[in-house]
């Protein structure tokens, strides 16, 4: 609907509403004045009529009263009825041809009336003013006159006023049409221009076609707005072209996507890698997917957050460092601008560097291990050299002193033997005990000298086939086992003879038995067993003595190391050398306070 039609209808509606309201107010005012005039007239008529019939009513001249009422009814056109209530409160005369209406038949005796009044009734659809007036004030007798509530002069005046109102409304309609055409025509042109302006058409300016100073100012303002928008569009177009040129010249890939996952822009770098983008969703363009990617960052970006992440493209086997940032458009919407930085070579370099670092770390660890190993070897070699020097000196000393000591020890031992023979008849136990002590100490000294001589020069073993079980039994028979120590042998019967030097191996067994006995000062059990394991024969010496501490376990085979009060620490060292000479090894397991287990393992089995 045209603007001028809307304005005309609005003006007409206002005129009609105003005219109707004015006519209503005028008619109400006239009606009120008419009613007041009728009430005054009726009261005057009632007073005149009451004065005329009062005498007849007092004398109860009913016929005279009725004639007076009929005469009055004929002369007054607006009077509908007249009736009289006598002094007893009963209707004595009336002008109703069909009899009194029901409302008056149900009339009760009136109270005493001091002054007149008016009541309103509807009789046969007509609004009646019922005027009552006392014949004598303060008495029951009174007169009722019914008059129509109608005034011909007032009706005529209402018709005239209505006609004037209609004429005013018609004149207002014409004026509204003329004014609306004058006012709304330029407004319609402005409206059309605004509609075109909203569509982006800013080439034409609006011409002034009248309508007053306000319309002229509005037209000028609109034209200025068109010019400003034209300049703004030119600026935006320039900046957009500038931005596109910048994005097109960047070495990094750039693309822009809206909230519907439609790609709005892709720069040449990405086009070369992924191809044309028109009409393709971003998840299909980059990932060949038919639905949104589970890892998509769009919602975070559209919420205003900048996200940086790394992505590997299976399409071109490239790795990209991605930066997603929100971009506000001219219409207020938000798009996502994503920067693709190809870091494939950087990642490859990182992988190579990582491998180089790992290799370098491994080489460093190996070098440290080698240095540590070499240092330990040098340390061991140095210790071995020092030990050899000591042992050389010890060997030289043992060779020179050993024989010299054995000779006087032999003489002393013979003397002890001679004394034992001479004192058999002497009942002196103290002398016997002392001689026994001398024998034991001589044996100990002899054992030390033997160890020194054996350690100084290990002779080449004289091998012969030997029953290992029998060799153990012979060694046990030569050993001094205290009564509080129980020996528990457990031999495998079908062990083949071993090609060994029985004297040297017997010396090994003797040393191990003596060590076990010395470790069980409070008594215990020494279990000696043999067994066959793969290609080896093992002899196990298992005691429940005091055991060996962890810190001393690695030193027990070193020469001159001992934790005993007696002895010089050559027993196990000599045993190890003898075992090596007979192609055997000695293994040990021990825990302090829980005993020790020595295993002599012979590798070679010969018949």
Image (cartoon, rainbow, N blue to C red):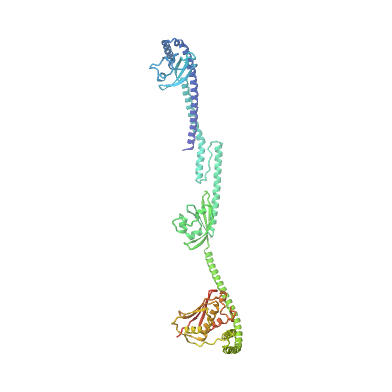
Total labels: the figure holds 0
Q: Residue at x 51, y 50 (%)?
A: 333
**Image location of residue 331, percent across then percent down:** 52, 48
Outermost residue on the left side: it is 98
Q: Nearer the viewer, residue 165 or 418?
A: 418
Q: In which quarter of the image is residue 401?
A: bottom right
**Image location of residue 590, percent across then percent down:** 53, 75
**Image location of residue 253, percent across then percent down:** 52, 59
| Left or right: residue 483 compared with residue 68 | right
Q: Which of 184 and 156 is in front in this view?
A: 156
> In the rendered image, is residue 327 in sight?
yes
Q: Nearer the viewer, residue 267 or 479?
A: 479
Look at the picture and state if 167 lies above or below 510.
Answer: above
> In the rendered image, is residue 45 in sight?
no
Look at the picture and state if 144 lies above or below 174.
Answer: above
Q: Residue at x 52, y 78 (%)?
A: 485
| Left or right: residue 92 compared with residue 226 | left
């Amino acid at each position: 609907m045209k603007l001028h039609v809307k304005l005309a209808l609005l003006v007409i509606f206002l005129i009609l509403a105003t005219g109707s309201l004015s006519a209503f107010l005028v008619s109400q005012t006239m009606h009120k004045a008419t009613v007041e005039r009728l009430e005054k007239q009726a009261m005057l008529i009632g007073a005149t009529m009451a004065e005329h019939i009062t005498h007849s009513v007092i004398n109860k001249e009913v016929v005279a009263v009725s004639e007076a009422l009929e005469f009055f009814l004929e002369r007054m056109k607006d009077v509908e009825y007249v009736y009289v209530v006598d002094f007893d409160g009963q209707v004595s005369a009336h002008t109703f041809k069909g009899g009194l209406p029901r409302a008056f038949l149900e009339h009760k005796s009136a109270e005493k009336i001091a002054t007149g009044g008016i009541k309103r009734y509807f009789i046969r659809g007509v609004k009646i003013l019922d005027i009552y007036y006392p014949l004598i004030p303060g008495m029951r007798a009174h007169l009722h006159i019914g008059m129509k509530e109608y005034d011909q002069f007032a009706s005529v005046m209402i018709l005239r006023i209505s006609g004037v109102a209609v004429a005013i409304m018609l004149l207002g309609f014409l004026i509204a049409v003329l004014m609306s055409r004058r006012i709304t025509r330029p407004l319609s042109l402005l409206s059309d221009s605004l509609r075109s302006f909203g569509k982006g058409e800013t080439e034409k300016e609006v011409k002034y076609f009248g309508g007053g100073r306000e319309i002229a100012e509005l037209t000028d303002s609109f034209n200025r707005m068109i010019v400003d928008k034209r300049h703004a569009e030119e600026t935006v177009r320039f900046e957009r072209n500038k931005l596109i040129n910048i994005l097109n010249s960047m070495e990094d890939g750039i693309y822009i996507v809206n909230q519907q996952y439609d790609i709005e822009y892709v720069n040449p770098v990405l086009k070369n890698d992924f191809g044309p983008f028109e009409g393709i969703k971003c998840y299909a363009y980059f990932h060949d997917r038919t639905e949104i990617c589970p890892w998509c960052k769009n919602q975070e970006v559209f919420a205003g957050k900048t996200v940086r992440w790394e992505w590997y493209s299976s399409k071109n086997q490239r790795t990209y460092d991605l930066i997603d940032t929100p971009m506000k458009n001219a219409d207020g919407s938000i798009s996502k601008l994503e920067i693709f930085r190809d870091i494939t070579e950087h990642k490859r370099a990182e992988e190579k560097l990582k491998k180089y670092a790992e290799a370098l770390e491994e080489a460093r660890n190996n070098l440290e291990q080698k240095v540590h190993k070499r240092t330990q070897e040098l340390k061991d070699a140095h210790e071995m050299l020092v030990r050899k020097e000591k042992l050389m000196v010890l060997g030289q000393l043992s060779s020179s002193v050993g024989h010299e000591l054995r000779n006087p020890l032999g003489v002393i031992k013979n003397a002890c033997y001679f004394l034992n023979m001479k004192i058999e008849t002497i009942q002196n136990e103290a002398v016997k005990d002392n001689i026994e002590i001398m024998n034991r100490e001589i044996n100990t000294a002899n054992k030390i000298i033997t160890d020194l001589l054996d350690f100084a020069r290990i002779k080449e073993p004289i091998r012969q086939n030997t029953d290992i079980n029998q060799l153990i039994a012979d060694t046990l028979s030569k050993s001094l086992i205290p009564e509080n120590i129980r020996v528990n042998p457990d031999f495998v019967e079908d062990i083949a003879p071993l090609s060994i030097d029985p004297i040297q191996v017997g010396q090994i067994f003797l040393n191990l038995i003596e060590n076990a006995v010395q470790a069980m000062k409070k008594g215990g059990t020494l279990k000696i067993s043999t067994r066959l394991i793969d290609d080896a024969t093992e002899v196990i010496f298992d005691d429940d003595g005091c055991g060996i501490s962890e810190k001393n376990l690695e030193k027990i085979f070193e020469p001159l190391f001992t934790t005993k009060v007696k002895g010089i620490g050559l027993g196990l060292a000599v045993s190890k050398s003898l075992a090596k000479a007979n192609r055997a090894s000695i293994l040990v397991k021990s825990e302090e306070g829980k005993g020790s287990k020595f295993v002599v393992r012979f590798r070679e089995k010969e018949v």
